[in-house]
Image (tube, rainbow, N blue to C red):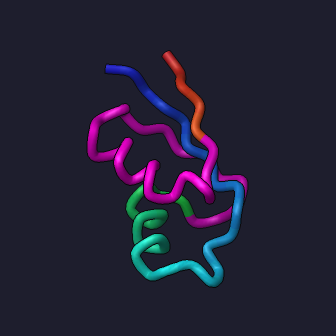
Amino acid sequence: MAKIKVKKVKSAINRTLRQKRTLEALGLKKIGQVVEHEATPNILGMVKKVNHLVSVEETK
């Protein structure tokens, strides 16, 4: 399965609690932090919900 790197690029201040919890579930706490996940439908759905706060890059 493909892997993706997710990087937090914007703050979660003034965001809904749901978006904050989604960032936490992805493992993102600080701006600039990068985490790597499998590209499963669950993870891709979470990334889609907060795509305005993160950047995504595919890796091998």
Q: Position of residue 33 (x, y in %)?
A: 65, 53
Q: For residue 42: magenta?
A: yes
Quadrant of the image occupied by residue 6: top right
The answer to whether residue 41 is left or right of residue 8 is: left
Residue 40 placement (x, y as % from top left): 29, 35
Chain part drawn in magenta:
29-55
Does residue 17 appear left or right of residue 43 in this picture? Answer: right
Location of the N terminus by quadrant is top left
Q: Residue at x 46, y 70 (%)?
A: 19
Residue 44: give x, y in percent of width and height: 38, 42
Across the whole image, how many numbered discs are drawn on residues?
Answer: 0
Residue at (72, 53) in percent of width and height: 32
Residue under the point 35% across and 48% down: 45
Q: Determine whether 42 is above or below 31 in the image.
A: above
Q: Where is residue 4 in the image (x, y as percent from the top left)?
A: 48, 32
Q: Nearer the viewer, residue 11 or 28?
A: 11
Q: In this view, does 35 lie above or below 13?
A: above
* Residue occupying the point 55% across, 52% down: 51
Q: Is residue 28 left or right of residue 17?
A: right
Q: Nearer the viewer, residue 29 or 41?
A: 41
Task: Name the outermost residue toward the left.
Answer: 41
Q: Quadrant of residue 2?
A: top left
